[in-house]
Amino acid sequence: MEQYYFETRKAVRRNLPGRARCSGRVNQSEERKRREIANHQIAAARIRDLIRGLERTVLSLNGSIDAILQGHQVRDPSDFAYPIAARTMSIRRDNIRGTIAVLSQQLADIIGAQSAP
């Protein structure tokens, strides 16, 4: 009789921890998914803010370039007499536009990852 009691206790002990681990894994998986979603949302918000700031910078550079070109007769960037300040601002503006394009792609990837099952 003692052996039977020992075997049943052993079986009970064996089964319970397995169930607890399984439910723990499910909870961990769900928690990891929730954290991933929250991290994606935070990253998307940061990228949106960064894009907005860069777009404002592009608008400011456009205004500065226009202001510089108002006082000069040469409007062709390939002409040697084109103002150096306008040329450097144009290059900077183009680089910022490229950065905006890369960030927009990253934002699209994040949004795509959120909508995927």
Image (cartoon, rainbow, N blue to C red):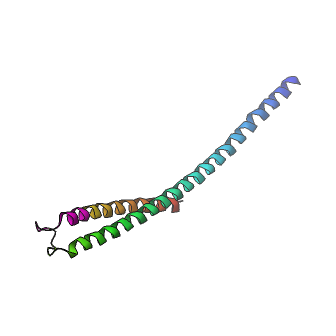
Question: Dividing the image into 4 quarters, which one contains the C terminus?
Answer: bottom right
Q: Could you say which is closer to the camera, residue 25 or residue 33?
A: 33
Across and down, in percent, residue 110 comes to 47, 59
Across and down, in percent, residue 10 comes to 78, 30
**Extreme top residue here?**
2
Taking the spot 22% from the left edge, 66% from the top edge, the residue there is 86
Across and down, in percent, residue 21 comes to 68, 40
Q: Could you say which is closer to the camera, residue 73 or residue 55?
A: 73
Picture layout, residue 31 above or below residue 76: above
Query: Left or right: 27 with respect to 111?
Result: right
Picture layout, residue 109 above or below residue 72: above
Picture layout, residue 77 above or below residue 12: below
Taking the spot 33% from the left edge, 67% from the top edge, the residue there is 58
- Residue 105 belongs to the span the image colors magenta: no
Q: Could you say which is closer to the camera, residue 59 or residue 12?
A: 59
Across and down, in percent, residue 1 comes to 89, 25
Taking the spot 73% from the left edge, 37% from the top edge, the residue there is 17
Q: Picture quarter containing residue 74? A: bottom left
